[in-house]
Amino acid sequence: MTDVVKLERHDAIAIVTVDNLPVNALSAAVRRGISESVEQAIADPAVKAIVLVCAGRTFIAGADITEFGKPPQSPGLGEVIAELENSPKPIVAAIHGTALGGGLETALGCHYRVAVKDAKLGLPEVKLGLLPGAGGTQRLPRAVGPELAVKMIVGGDPIGAADAFKHGLIDAIVEDTVAGGEAFARQVLAEQRPLRKLRDDDAKLQAAKADRAIFTDAVAAMTKKARGLEAPFAAADAIGAAIDLPFDQGLKKEREGFMKLVAGEQSKAQRYAFFAEREAAKVSGVPDGTRPRPVARVAIIGAGTMGGGIAMSFANAGIPVTLIETGEEQLQRGLGVMRKNYDATAARGGIPADAPTKRMALIAGVVGLEHVKDADLIIEAVFETMAVKKEVFTAIDAYAKPGAVLASNTSYLNIDEIAQVTRRPEDVLGMHFFSPANVMKLCEIVRADKTAPDALLTAVAIARKIAKVPAVVGVCDGFVGNRMLAARGKQAEKLLFEGALPQQVDAVVTKFGMPMGPFAMGDLAGLDIGWRSRKDRGITSEIADALCEAGRFGQKTGKGYYKYEPGSRAPLPDPEVETLINDTLSKLGLKRREIFDQEILERMMYPMINEGARILEEGIAARPSDIDVIWLYGYGWPVYRGGPMFYADQVGLKQIAERLSYYARATNDATLEPAPLLARLAAEGGNFAALAKPAKAA
Ligand code: 3H9
């Protein structure tokens, strides 16, 4: 019919195949193709039933996200779905891969759905700051009941075929989409008519109509973590309309909600983040045809918090790990912590009951660095000093097999220097995981001077395989994330000397959407670490030093910038800290001034953005979007604000440059002057987005 949709006939069964790689997104051509094919099949007297299938790796994975924000093209998806639903001949959607968003909505417009056993079905629109806009909020509750519909639509996670079958979302599990779909279609030919249209089937809504708490409780549970986000609440409203209103009115309500969200700032940021994440996996400056090296076994050195978390990430992906410690006691302690973590997750229902044993079985704990010899990738996660790292890398070099990739999990040390102690610097790079490493999704992949392209791609590929989001960065102190964080930390500290209190600074940062402010974060990490390092370097920071001298090391001592009730991690403002700050300032002859929240916000965010600009200038990050990915996945930057560089473009670079210059003068701090790149873009009326360089696919 068209290039992207084909129509064939197998006797009485018409097969409509969508073939729009890579994920069969519903572009205008696909919508037109489905509509025309179905029309033709209906008109053909020899056709008695229609099967809708997809070529390639997946059923339709949704609307074409790149079309959002552009003028709409006919036919709209809603119209196509109505055509399917109103077809006088039964239509069977046969699903493999992932039927997502508009893809599942298309399937919900069909009279029957079948799927292969590893298929997944979901409405993930909330993750793009949207709600399902082609009837999903009205048909899914009618297919599976409002409770599960809320879970799937407001939460955005897909379900597997077995669950889908159990809850009536699909009618059968088949071996193969075309053969299985066709066989199913023949089977239902003789079934009683009229055909079932989900729009007319209110049976599963009755319980929630009688007792609205079924719906509101489900919404409350699913929106608990939706702070600051608009889409989950709008999606819940649309599902509520399915319960309260006739189908067509519910559909209208859904449409209004969708149109509002798709035009809004949040969805724009979330769609940007979706593509930024995929872009980050494409590495620039790698010759065409470079392939990652195979990785069958990984060795991790160090069974502490980081090493253990990294080992769990590999075991979670089914990759065998050799976990190496220097002594039996440390090893057993590390393995014990991992087992406890797994058990706790299983007890919460986060993983199947047998998963802890299965995953621990993939982790072989051993003592002695010689055990790295079988590994294709070795990740060092030992104490953060250069001397220790060098010692460990010298030993790895002695034992590792040729071609193994040697990675350090350092969060700031110079990888070039580490690589120099080996005879194979081309195999050395950084893989900087974030704590807790089994939870946090970011992995900064640090490309050193001599890192070979295929070693780099190996790290990127394996990071994706263990469900991390990789971002390639260059060597500098703190790499991208921690270097920008340090720029923010410096301002946070200065604000205390000028009159702000920790809770005021933190409140501005959390109101912006970050999970924690800098002072609560300091308390969590432990203030004694910075204190010791300042002492070593002969540096003072009078307020932080005074806190440590008073034994206030943060959460671990129940007191830091805040106080903590026993057993609680909730930071409580402490009048003693205010007194301590006042005393320190009077000793230094400083006076507190009133500082408004807007100043705090600007001084928390703009210096970070400025540092981001320097990072781009120096080529430490290849693209502004890579920096955004690092903040989204490593530091909990709110996805609806896209990331610091995206946010900067929204505020306007001219405004940011002006404010930075102002603060440079007002606080006598030349480091706040706009970086040359930022100053240039601001003067030209430019933005970071325009700098995005296309990369070659990894
Ligand atoms: C929606 O449906 C709204 C409707 O309710 C209402 C309409 C009125 N569009 O992720 P991958 C690209 S909203 C355009 O690396 P995987 C992606 O950018 C949509 N492009 O593969 C990448 O391009 P490139 C609801 C898309 O195997 C390539 O495909 N649906 C789309 O790891 C491969 O992607 C969703 O939110 C798209 N919809 O994962 C699903 N999807 O190679 C979004 C992907 O140039 N998609 N691309 O970098 C996904 O979750 C994953 O892509 C999927 C495959 C699980 C499907």
Image (cartoon, helix red, strand yellow):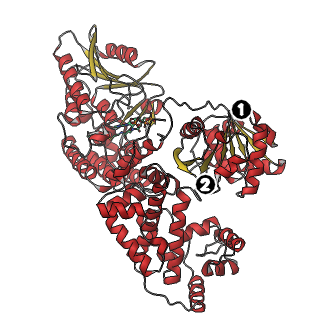
**SS for tag 2?**
loop
Q: Residue at x 54, y 61 (%)?
A: 483
Q: Residue at x 43, y 18 (%)?
A: 176
- Observer able to see residue 642: yes
Image quadrant, ligand 1: top left
**How many labels were placed on the picture?**
2
In the displayed orientation, state which residue is furthest to the right.
328
Q: Position of residue 598 (x, y in %)?
A: 38, 74
Q: Is residue 472 above or below residue 77?
A: below
**SS for tag 1?**
loop
Q: Which residue is nearer to you in this view: 71 or 539?
A: 539
Q: Position of residue 659 (x, y in %)?
A: 37, 73
Q: Amino acid at mark 1?
A: Pro
- Quadrant of the image containing the N terminus: top left
Q: Which residue is nearer to you in this view: 74 or 122?
A: 74
The residue under label 2 is: 435
Q: Is residue 633 above or below residue 294?
A: below
Label 1 to label 2: alpha-carbon separation: 30 Å
Q: Are marks 1 and 2 in contact (CB under 8 Å)?
A: no
The residue under label 1 is: 402
Q: Position of residue 626 (x, y in %)?
A: 46, 50
In the displayed orientation, state which residue is furthest to the top.
11
Asked if residue 571 lies left or right of residue 385, the reply is left
